[in-house]
Image (cartoon, grey):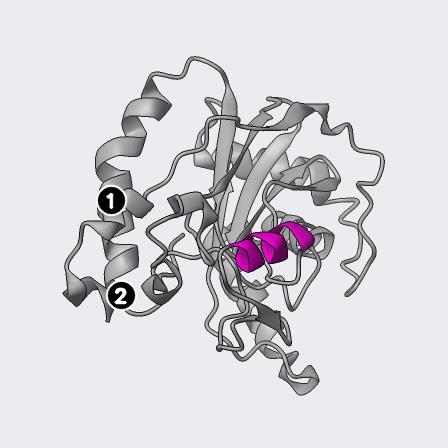
Amino acid sequence: MFDGHGGINSRQKVAKYSEENLHVRITNDSKFKTDIGNAGDSLAVLSEDDMAIPMSDDHKPSNPDESDRITEAGGFVEFGRVNSKNLALSCALGDFEFKQNTKLGVEKQIVTAYPDVKKHRIKIESTEFLVLACIWDCFKSQDVVSFIRKNIAEHNDLKRACEDLMERCLSKTGKGIGTDNMTIIIIGFLYNKTETEWYKWMTSKYGEKSSEYKEDRLPTNNNYDYSDIYYENNKFTIDDYLSKEDDSNKD
Protein backbone atom coordinates (compact mmCIF):
# COMPACT_ATOMS: atom_id res chain seq x y z
CA MET A 1 0.00 0.00 0.00
CA PHE A 2 1.64 3.22 -1.17
CA ASP A 3 0.68 6.76 -0.17
CA GLY A 4 3.28 8.90 -1.91
CA HIS A 5 3.60 12.46 -0.64
CA GLY A 6 4.18 15.44 -2.90
CA GLY A 7 2.52 13.99 -6.00
CA ILE A 8 1.68 10.61 -7.53
CA ASN A 9 5.09 9.82 -9.02
CA SER A 10 6.65 8.45 -5.84
CA ARG A 11 4.04 5.76 -5.31
CA GLN A 12 4.01 4.87 -9.02
CA LYS A 13 7.77 4.35 -9.02
CA VAL A 14 7.63 2.28 -5.82
CA ALA A 15 4.84 0.10 -7.20
CA LYS A 16 6.85 -0.52 -10.38
CA TYR A 17 10.03 -1.26 -8.44
CA SER A 18 8.21 -3.65 -6.10
CA GLU A 19 6.55 -5.51 -8.96
CA GLU A 20 9.90 -6.06 -10.67
CA ASN A 21 12.01 -6.94 -7.62
CA LEU A 22 10.19 -8.14 -4.49
CA HIS A 23 8.89 -11.41 -5.96
CA VAL A 24 12.47 -12.61 -6.40
CA ARG A 25 13.08 -12.53 -2.65
CA ILE A 26 9.66 -13.95 -1.79
CA THR A 27 9.87 -16.96 -4.13
CA ASN A 28 13.40 -17.78 -2.96
CA ASP A 29 12.41 -17.80 0.72
CA SER A 30 11.58 -21.32 1.87
CA LYS A 31 10.41 -20.31 5.36
CA PHE A 32 6.67 -19.97 5.91
CA LYS A 33 6.48 -16.44 7.23
CA THR A 34 5.23 -12.99 6.36
CA ASP A 35 7.52 -9.97 5.92
CA ILE A 36 6.16 -6.49 6.72
CA GLY A 37 8.02 -3.33 5.75
CA ASN A 38 6.58 -0.02 6.91
CA ALA A 39 7.56 3.62 6.55
CA GLY A 40 4.85 6.05 7.61
CA ASP A 41 1.51 5.89 9.39
CA SER A 42 -0.19 3.13 7.40
CA LEU A 43 -0.12 0.06 9.63
CA ALA A 44 -0.32 -3.71 9.24
CA VAL A 45 -2.22 -5.84 11.75
CA LEU A 46 -2.40 -9.63 11.77
CA SER A 47 -5.44 -11.60 12.96
CA GLU A 48 -4.50 -14.74 14.84
CA ASP A 49 -7.27 -16.61 16.66
CA ASP A 50 -8.94 -14.00 18.89
CA MET A 51 -6.08 -11.49 18.88
CA ALA A 52 -4.86 -8.52 16.85
CA ILE A 53 -1.09 -8.71 16.36
CA PRO A 54 0.61 -5.38 15.45
CA MET A 55 3.06 -5.92 12.59
CA SER A 56 4.31 -2.36 12.11
CA ASP A 57 4.95 0.83 14.05
CA ASP A 58 3.37 4.23 13.54
CA HIS A 59 6.06 6.70 12.47
CA LYS A 60 5.01 9.93 14.14
CA PRO A 61 7.35 12.94 14.60
CA SER A 62 6.56 12.96 18.33
CA ASN A 63 7.97 9.45 18.84
CA PRO A 64 11.31 9.79 20.69
CA ASP A 65 13.39 7.86 18.12
CA GLU A 66 11.83 9.74 15.23
CA SER A 67 12.15 13.11 16.96
CA ASP A 68 15.83 12.45 17.71
CA ARG A 69 16.57 11.63 14.07
CA ILE A 70 14.73 14.73 12.84
CA THR A 71 16.66 16.96 15.25
CA GLU A 72 20.03 15.40 14.41
CA ALA A 73 19.32 15.97 10.71
CA GLY A 74 18.73 19.68 11.31
CA GLY A 75 14.95 19.71 11.56
CA PHE A 76 12.55 20.19 14.45
CA VAL A 77 9.15 18.99 15.63
CA GLU A 78 6.42 21.44 16.59
CA PHE A 79 2.77 20.70 17.29
CA GLY A 80 3.40 17.09 16.25
CA ARG A 81 4.55 18.08 12.77
CA VAL A 82 7.87 18.20 10.94
CA ASN A 83 9.38 21.70 10.72
CA SER A 84 5.93 23.14 11.45
CA LYS A 85 4.84 22.01 7.98
CA ASN A 86 1.63 20.10 7.32
CA LEU A 87 3.40 16.76 7.69
CA ALA A 88 2.28 14.67 10.66
CA LEU A 89 4.51 11.68 9.92
CA SER A 90 8.27 11.25 9.97
CA CYS A 91 8.75 8.49 7.38
CA ALA A 92 7.32 8.78 3.89
CA LEU A 93 7.78 8.14 0.21
CA GLY A 94 8.31 11.41 -1.60
CA ASP A 95 8.53 14.63 0.47
CA PHE A 96 11.94 15.26 -1.10
CA GLU A 97 12.26 18.70 0.46
CA PHE A 98 13.09 16.92 3.73
CA LYS A 99 15.72 14.66 2.11
CA GLN A 100 18.28 17.20 0.91
CA ASN A 101 21.15 16.73 3.39
CA THR A 102 23.94 15.28 1.23
CA LYS A 103 26.11 14.62 4.30
CA LEU A 104 23.66 12.08 5.68
CA GLY A 105 22.56 8.66 4.52
CA VAL A 106 19.00 8.06 3.35
CA GLU A 107 18.02 6.53 6.68
CA LYS A 108 19.14 9.62 8.65
CA GLN A 109 17.29 12.33 6.73
CA ILE A 110 14.63 14.51 8.39
CA VAL A 111 12.03 12.37 6.62
CA THR A 112 13.03 8.96 5.29
CA ALA A 113 11.50 6.06 3.38
CA TYR A 114 13.87 3.67 5.17
CA PRO A 115 11.42 1.15 6.66
CA ASP A 116 11.11 -0.94 9.76
CA VAL A 117 10.87 -4.57 8.69
CA LYS A 118 9.22 -7.25 10.81
CA LYS A 119 8.84 -10.96 10.18
CA HIS A 120 6.18 -13.25 11.61
CA ARG A 121 6.06 -17.03 11.65
CA ILE A 122 2.70 -18.02 10.21
CA LYS A 123 0.74 -20.67 12.11
CA ILE A 124 -1.40 -22.74 9.77
CA GLU A 125 -3.98 -23.52 12.45
CA SER A 126 -4.47 -19.97 13.73
CA THR A 127 -3.12 -17.19 11.43
CA GLU A 128 -6.20 -15.93 9.59
CA PHE A 129 -5.70 -12.68 7.71
CA LEU A 130 -3.60 -9.52 7.44
CA VAL A 131 -5.03 -5.99 7.39
CA LEU A 132 -3.15 -3.16 5.66
CA ALA A 133 -4.89 0.13 6.28
CA CYS A 134 -4.70 3.83 7.13
CA ILE A 135 -7.85 4.11 9.26
CA TRP A 136 -6.22 3.67 12.68
CA ASP A 137 -7.23 7.15 13.86
CA CYS A 138 -10.79 5.82 13.81
CA PHE A 139 -10.43 2.40 15.42
CA LYS A 140 -8.04 0.39 17.55
CA SER A 141 -6.35 -2.64 16.02
CA GLN A 142 -8.37 -5.13 18.06
CA ASP A 143 -11.63 -3.45 17.08
CA VAL A 144 -10.72 -3.66 13.39
CA VAL A 145 -9.93 -7.39 13.36
CA SER A 146 -12.98 -8.17 15.53
CA PHE A 147 -15.21 -6.22 13.13
CA ILE A 148 -13.72 -8.03 10.11
CA ARG A 149 -14.07 -11.50 11.67
CA LYS A 150 -17.74 -10.90 12.48
CA ASN A 151 -18.36 -9.46 9.01
CA ILE A 152 -16.70 -12.42 7.29
CA ALA A 153 -18.73 -14.90 9.34
CA GLU A 154 -21.95 -13.12 8.34
CA HIS A 155 -21.30 -12.31 4.67
CA ASN A 156 -18.32 -14.42 3.42
CA ASP A 157 -17.00 -11.49 1.40
CA LEU A 158 -13.72 -9.66 2.07
CA LYS A 159 -14.67 -6.85 -0.29
CA ARG A 160 -17.83 -6.21 1.71
CA ALA A 161 -15.82 -6.31 4.95
CA CYS A 162 -13.59 -3.52 3.58
CA GLU A 163 -16.56 -1.44 2.43
CA ASP A 164 -18.52 -1.88 5.66
CA LEU A 165 -15.51 -0.92 7.76
CA MET A 166 -14.92 2.24 5.72
CA GLU A 167 -18.59 3.13 6.11
CA ARG A 168 -18.19 2.73 9.87
CA CYS A 169 -15.19 5.09 9.76
CA LEU A 170 -17.21 7.71 7.88
CA SER A 171 -19.98 7.53 10.46
CA LYS A 172 -17.53 8.81 13.10
CA THR A 173 -16.94 12.17 11.42
CA GLY A 174 -18.79 13.93 14.22
CA LYS A 175 -15.70 13.40 16.39
CA GLY A 176 -13.46 15.18 13.92
CA ILE A 177 -12.02 12.03 12.34
CA GLY A 178 -12.91 9.87 9.39
CA THR A 179 -12.64 12.64 6.77
CA ASP A 180 -9.25 11.73 5.25
CA ASN A 181 -8.80 9.40 2.27
CA MET A 182 -9.00 5.75 3.31
CA THR A 183 -7.45 2.49 2.17
CA ILE A 184 -8.15 -0.98 3.57
CA ILE A 185 -6.66 -4.19 2.19
CA ILE A 186 -7.46 -7.59 3.74
CA ILE A 187 -5.33 -10.59 2.80
CA GLY A 188 -6.64 -14.02 3.78
CA PHE A 189 -4.16 -16.86 4.38
CA LEU A 190 -5.65 -19.86 2.55
CA TYR A 191 -3.09 -22.64 3.26
CA ASN A 192 -4.13 -24.87 0.35
CA LYS A 193 -7.79 -24.14 1.04
CA THR A 194 -10.04 -22.84 -1.69
CA GLU A 195 -11.63 -19.44 -1.11
CA THR A 196 -14.93 -21.15 -0.28
CA GLU A 197 -13.23 -23.49 2.18
CA TRP A 198 -11.47 -20.55 3.86
CA TYR A 199 -14.77 -18.71 4.36
CA LYS A 200 -16.30 -21.87 5.86
CA TRP A 201 -13.29 -22.18 8.19
CA MET A 202 -13.70 -18.59 9.36
CA THR A 203 -17.47 -19.01 9.79
CA SER A 204 -16.96 -22.17 11.85
CA LYS A 205 -14.63 -20.24 14.16
CA TYR A 206 -16.64 -17.04 14.53
CA GLY A 207 -20.12 -17.60 13.09
CA GLU A 208 -21.84 -19.07 16.13
CA LYS A 209 -19.98 -17.44 19.00
CA SER A 210 -19.49 -14.27 16.91
CA SER A 211 -18.54 -12.13 19.90
CA GLU A 212 -20.27 -8.76 19.72
CA TYR A 213 -18.24 -6.01 18.13
CA LYS A 214 -17.81 -3.26 20.68
CA GLU A 215 -16.47 0.11 19.61
CA ASP A 216 -13.34 1.22 21.46
CA ARG A 217 -12.96 -2.18 23.15
CA LEU A 218 -9.55 -2.52 24.74
CA PRO A 219 -7.10 -4.89 22.98
CA THR A 220 -7.02 -8.44 24.35
CA ASN A 221 -3.57 -9.42 23.12
CA ASN A 222 -1.52 -8.29 26.14
CA ASN A 223 -0.47 -11.88 26.86
CA TYR A 224 0.55 -12.68 23.29
CA ASP A 225 3.92 -14.35 22.85
CA TYR A 226 5.77 -11.83 20.70
CA SER A 227 8.72 -14.21 20.18
CA ASP A 228 7.13 -15.02 16.83
CA ILE A 229 7.62 -11.41 15.70
CA TYR A 230 11.08 -10.04 15.12
CA TYR A 231 12.75 -7.18 13.30
CA GLU A 232 14.76 -7.83 10.17
CA ASN A 233 18.30 -6.56 10.78
CA ASN A 234 19.09 -6.03 7.12
CA LYS A 235 16.72 -3.26 6.21
CA PHE A 236 16.09 -2.29 2.61
CA THR A 237 15.45 1.12 1.13
CA ILE A 238 14.18 2.51 -2.15
CA ASP A 239 15.26 6.11 -1.51
CA ASP A 240 18.32 5.59 -3.72
CA TYR A 241 16.03 4.43 -6.49
CA LEU A 242 13.68 7.38 -6.09
CA SER A 243 16.50 9.92 -5.84
CA LYS A 244 17.55 9.07 -9.40
CA GLU A 245 14.31 10.43 -10.80
CA ASP A 246 14.27 13.90 -12.33
CA ASP A 247 12.54 16.94 -10.91
CA SER A 248 9.28 16.00 -12.59
CA ASN A 249 8.89 13.30 -9.97
CA LYS A 250 9.03 15.81 -7.14
CA ASP A 251 5.85 17.71 -7.94
224 to the left or right of 100: right
Q: Mark 1 near mark 2, Cβ–Cβ under 8 Å?
A: no
Residue drawn at the location 71% of the way across and 35% of the way down: 49
Mark 1 vs 2, N-terminal side: 2
Q: Vertical placement of 191 versus 185: above or below?
A: above
Dot 1 alpha-carbon crowd within 10 angstroms: few under 14, some 14 to 19, many 20 or more? few
| Magenta stretch secondary structure, dominant | helix
Residue 127 seen by the camera:
yes
Q: Which mark is residue 14?
A: none
232 and 62: which is toward the camera: 62
Residue 100, image quadrant: bottom left
The residue wearing badge 2 is: 8
Residue drawn at the location 70% of the way across and 45% of the way down: 207
Task: Locate the C terminus by quadrant.
Answer: bottom left
State the CA–CA distance, disc 1 to disc 2: 16 Å
User: In the rendered structure, which amino acid carries the disc numbered 1?
Assistant: Tyr
Q: Residue 73: x and y, percent?
A: 49, 56
| Residue bounds of the magenta highlight | 64-72
Is residue 108 covered in magenta? Answer: no
The residue wearing badge 1 is: 241
